[in-house]
Amino acid sequence: MHLITLKNWSESDILETIENCLKIKNYPEKYRHAAGGLSLALLFQKTSTRTRCAGEIGIVQLGGHAHYLDWRTTNFGLADLGDEIRVLSAYVDITLARFLKHDDICKSGTASSVPIINGCCDRYHPTQAIGDLMTIKEHLGELEGIKVCFIGVHNNVCNSLIAAGMKVGLEVTVIAPEINPAAVDKELWSEAAQKGCYKPVSTDSIDSTIELQEVIAQNDVVYTDTWIDMEFFTDPDFAEERERRMKKMMPYQLNRTLLKGLDCKIMHCLPAHRGYEIAGELLDDPRAIIFEQSENRLHSMKAIILKLLGRS
């Protein structure tokens, strides 16, 4: 069993994992040896803070061992990906991979003889979604019927929220003036929309801050993410596109004016670009659960690891 995308996980898979996330957080001492003697490889093509720390520290806290591999210091870029994944899976018990392209994580899942965790690709970020659902359950007490408004660029994080929400009864409203081309998943969107779990709101129908507030006010959670993928934010070749996107997206920034008087939790998967998709002061707003959301990436990663190792 892999975690490539939550589209392939059942409702019981997700709910069981969420319950284990909370148990691991509340009773960590009971899990000190749950993965004793087992090894996790971390294979990363791009930068990471939360996902890397969650995997590397998480497996150690479960009694196992972590082995971090920077893509640039291996032969993965020089040889056939499937061949190298077969070799790596002969050395370790589970692999956490962060790849640029979704196709590569799929190829890895086919080639690997041990479980593969998608630690983020250009189409999905399933480990983020598991941590998000854990955080929502922790703060709101339930998942079914909870309404989340994702506002920003429709990306991999948004897709995984929709995929997870569709399985557990979460309703995800999306206000997205931009869609990352690599994140387009019409099959997912269509299925989720038919089930009433995905509600895209055309920005052409929103002419004012008041109208935007009215949409957000119908939700329990408002969620945003970076407008520019991390690997492009400081890339000079992407500068013109970055400026175009920033100008277009600024009316959709989360700030105190937009959220004035609204009783909703504020979420962001981090890292945040303060002053862009979210005003800096909102990260410390009483409604914000952003840093708890970040902490929960550790506990949820442990639950994912144990699920895939069959040690839940």
Image (spheres, grey):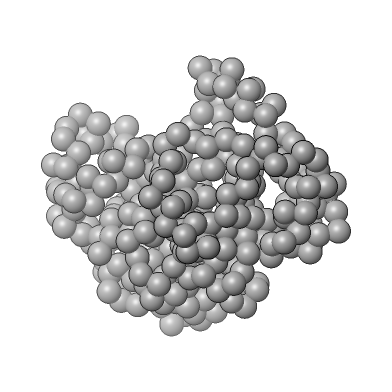
Q: In which quarter of the image is the C terminus?
A: bottom left
Horizontal side of 106 relative to 121 (left or right) equals left
Left or right of 177? Residue 93 is: left
| Residue 230 visible (yes or no) | no
Where in the figure is residue 163, as x and y percent of width and height? 44, 58
Taking 82 as reference, is 192 above or below it?
Answer: below
Q: What residue is rendered at 58% in x and 49% in y?
A: 200
In-front residue for pair 184/21 = 184
Evaluate whether residue 29 shows in this view: yes
Above/below status of 82 relative to 293: above
Q: How many marks?
A: 0
Q: Where is residue 106 in the image (x, y as percent from the top left)?
A: 26, 47
Residue at screen point 76% across, 59% down: 217
Q: In which quarter of the image is residue 135?
A: bottom right
Query: 82 or 126: which is nearer to us?
Result: 126
Q: Where is residue 101 in the image (x, y as percent from the top left)?
A: 34, 38
Q: In this view, does 2 lie to the left or right of 45?
A: left
- For residue 185, what is the image quadrant? top left
**282 relative position to 17: left or right:** right
